Amino acid sequence: MTDFKFNLPKHNKEALKAKEKLKAIEEQKAERENKYSSVNLKLLQEGRTADPLVQGVINRVAKRSNGGLLKFQVSMDEAKKPLDAWIQDTQEELLDAVLYLEKVRKELKHVKKILKSVNP
């Protein structure tokens, strides 16, 4: 028995390759859906997630919150200050974030320059 793929005209071979690639993508998608469709009910009940990236952020927020409770002896929910002060604090935090991003951008440019000189 001969493999029919070798007897196809070129355009049919390309169509077959595209069809096989699509099938592989669909299989990968199905695997992901199966992986996360059965998210552990215990995780949901505990307010956790199966996504490690998201869980890491949640853990950092909780750690930061607990540190704030120890330092200020008041939760964010209980904190009282004028709305303008909340806006001011947010602006200052965001300005710091812009500076941090700019610093990282500068460092990345420097690293790229070094890599380019080493491996032209």
Image: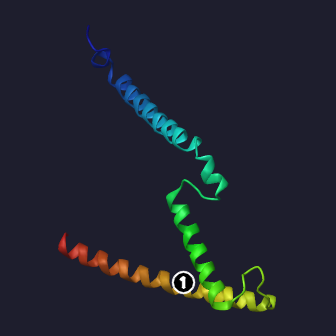
Residue occupying image coordinates x 50% and y 39%: 29
Q: Residue 53: horizontal and vertical position, in percent? A: 51, 62
Given residues 67 and 119, the one toward you in this image is 67
Q: Is the N terminus in the top left, top right, bottom left or bottom right quadrant? A: top left
Q: How many marks?
A: 1
State whether residue 31 is above or below residue 70. Answer: above
- Image quarter of residue 89: bottom right
Residue occupying image coordinates x 46% and y 38%: 28
State whether residue 1 is above or below residue 91. Answer: above
Mark 1 crowdedness (10 Å alpha carbons): few <14, some 14-19, many ≥20: few
Position of residue 119 in the picture relative to residue 40 (left or right): left
Q: Is the C terminus in the top left, top right, bottom left or bottom right quadrant? A: bottom left
Position of residue 71 in the picture relative to residue 7 (left or right): right
The three-letter amino acid code for the residue at tag 1 is Val
Given residues 72 and 2, the one toward you in this image is 72
Residue occupying image coordinates x 55% and y 88%: 96
Looking at the image, the residue that sits furthest to the top is 1
Position of residue 34 in the picture relative to residue 79 (left or right): left
The residue that disc 1 covers is 98
Q: Residue 105: horizontal and vertical position, in percent? A: 42, 79
- Image quarter of residue 55: bottom right
Q: Secondary structure at mark 1?
A: helix
Given residues 109 and 32, the one toward you in this image is 32
State whether residue 42 is above or below residue 102. Answer: above
Position of residue 104 in the picture relative to residue 10 (left or right): right
- Image quarter of residue 111: bottom left
Given residues 32 and 114, the one toward you in this image is 32
